[in-house]
Amino acid sequence: MDYVTWRSHGLRAALAGVGLMAAAPAFAAEITIWCWDPNFNVAIMREAGERYTKTHPDVTFNIVDFAKADVEQKLQTALASGTASALPDIVLIEDYGAQKYLQSFPGAFAPMSDKVDYSGFAPYKVEVMTVDGKVYGMPFDSGVTGLFYRRDYLEQAGFKPQDLQNITWDRYIEIGKAVEAKTGKKMTTQDLNNGGMTRIIMQSGNAWYFDKDGELAVEGNAALKGALEAQAKMVKAGIVKPATGWNDYVKAFTSGDVASVVTGVWITGTIKAQTDQSGKWGVAPIPKLDIPGAVSASNLGGSSWYVLAKSKQKDAAIDFLNAIYAKDLDFYQKILTERGAVGSLMAARTGDAYQKADPFFGGEKVWQQFSDWLGKVPAVNYGIFTNELDNAVTANMADLTGGKAVDDVIKAIDEQAKLQIQ
Amino acid sequence: MSPLLARRTASALRYLLLSFAAFLSVFPFFWMVIGATNTTADINKGKVSLGSALWDNVNGFFTAVDVPLILWNSTKIAIFGTALTMLVSSLAGYGFEMFRSKLRERIYTVVLLTLMVPFAAIMIPLFMLMASSGLINTHIAIILPTIASAFIIFYFRQASKAFPRELHDAAKIDGLKEWQIFLFIYVPVMRSTYAAAFVIVFMMNWNNYLWPLIVLQSNETKTITLAIASLSSAYYPDYGTVMIGTILATLPTLFVFFAMQRQFVQGMLGSVK
């Protein structure tokens, strides 16, 4: 079993460490890491660990995987009980929830501003982990968004890839109508019980449910209003094939039922798994909101690594993250190729894997495009109640698409949100 | 409508209703077995027939987790946890019924009141207690808090009401000590009560999730339920593999239930032999 070999590494390294102790102040350390998803985060952290161990044979890794909700539950319990010994050295936290932990447990996580050069990362990822000017954590995977579309369907309707560059949501709807008229396929799909689309459009408009100071900013939020309007218009125009749940949503675009989908870069693997559709896909920037400050780039999901302040291996853990995640460009090529992971270190784009043209997407250099957009994602404050706001938004989606005025819907969201977060 | 026809219609309706209920309760098992033989792609498509990916899924599960180890962990917790719970809680239930004292009912009320405290409320203090005793990441930390189960104490006290006091007195006259009466008279007489309690406690221990999740910190100490949860929370879960895991996790409880079905029913009805 994997961890058995890891264990024996640990033993050997510990023995080696004893020898080294006298000579140099090396860290003879075992770094414990909590994360979720054996095929993604765990596998990537293993790769990172192996790389680090090559130059630091005295450091070993104990990577423990739990379900995502379970990592959060364990972290919450151990932090709330103040039991430092029950915490790992490094933990993975989803970006949307990061501020909640950083602000609810001040002093629990180690600030890394003076050790890590954050200027090399996508700015929005750094914003996620900044509290009072101090940066905590190591930015990891990105959910930079794109408009994935079926070249063949759009061509049939008379559109070229250029026609999808720099478009507004209104234009997207027009194209959608034309596509349906020519091909009989709906333009896109959406699960209206999922707040993802609202979050994508809102962040592209350089805003969030909260302002820069973390105060609730639902009413008077042009980006949120634009996001709701765009979705209401799309449903009203009839270009959306409604989906129930994640599987249904994925099926809509992988089975060729719809012509495009706006979502995070991590969907690439799922789309490419449909090998018979090779060459039929393309990726464009997402449509833009018609408000000042809006861009054609956004984000959906993503998570980052945090070091616990009371960890005995704090220095080793920070040094490890810094050496691999902030500096090792080759590492980013490997995790992109093997795991489909798009990191948030901007320099990674210069590597081979990022420069490859992909025949599946008609020979486009998709990874270069995504890293272009990655740098443009607006940096917003995710605040501490993103989940609560998400619930308030999805609860009002039916009213919105049913024709209720957007301003009234916003008022209802605001009222519900205030009830929930007070 | 003739009375015969009415009766037939009624029984047809009853069968229809029962068949529907049976379908509802059996379907998850059916879906689990079907899922175990299909690829994730087929499961997502909602394929309801047997597939050919069984071996791949078995392989996938056995490479993803150390199956013998996690099964052993779960078994160890379930067996020791169940044995200790039965011993301690049945003794308490017996004691509450057999021995009269002024404080008895008050103490018993306090025990029952603990049933009303949700686990989430005591989780953090309990975690601190375990941490300060150095028991974090041990199986003992999982077993200890379950041993004194208010529900099982209540169950045994209720069942003990049917235990003939004359038997106790006769044994006493014959010179048995109290612990001997409990062990050699009470336990054998109440064996169907024990069987029912065993089934309940075993399932509670085997399926225990939240507390093991909080206490266990390493891959080596995990139980099968935790291993399955971690597999199924992947961004793209391999459902076929997860189904193999759920089958493995379900088999022991099914086995225990079917092996003790007769005693379980008797125990629930409260019979004394």
Image (tube, helix red, strand yellow):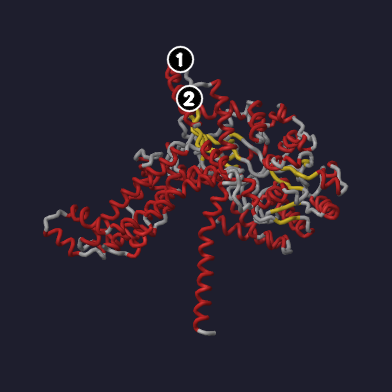
Disc 1: CA contacts within 10 A as few (<14), some (14-19) or many (>=20): few
State if disc 1 and disc 2 touch (CB < 8 Å): no
Q: In the displayed image of the protein, which residue is found farthest to the top? A: A23
Circle 2 sits in a helix, a strand or a loop, which is it? helix
List x then y, in percent, for residue A107.
50, 38
Disc 2: CA contacts within 10 A as few (<14), some (14-19) or many (>=20): some
Residue located at (51% from left, 77% from top): B8
Q: Can you say whether B227 is above or below A216 in the image?
A: above
Which quadrant of the figure contains the C terminus of chain A? bottom right
Question: Same chain for marks 2 and 1?
Answer: yes
Label 2, label 1: how far apart the Cα atoms are: 21 Å
In the foreground, B269 or A83: B269
Three-letter code for the amino acid on which mark 2 is drawn: His
For disc 1, the chain is A
Three-letter code for the amino acid on which mark 1 is drawn: Ala
List x then y, in percent, for residue B247.
50, 48
List x then y, in percent, for residue A342.
67, 35
Residue located at (63% from left, 52% from top): B47
Q: Can you say whether A316 is above or below A142 in the image?
A: above
Residue matched to label 2: A9
Q: Earlier in the sequence, mark 2 or mark 1?
A: 2
Residue matched to label 1: A23
Query: From the viewer's perspective, is A232 left or right of B270?
Result: right
List x then y, in percent, for residue A160.
86, 43
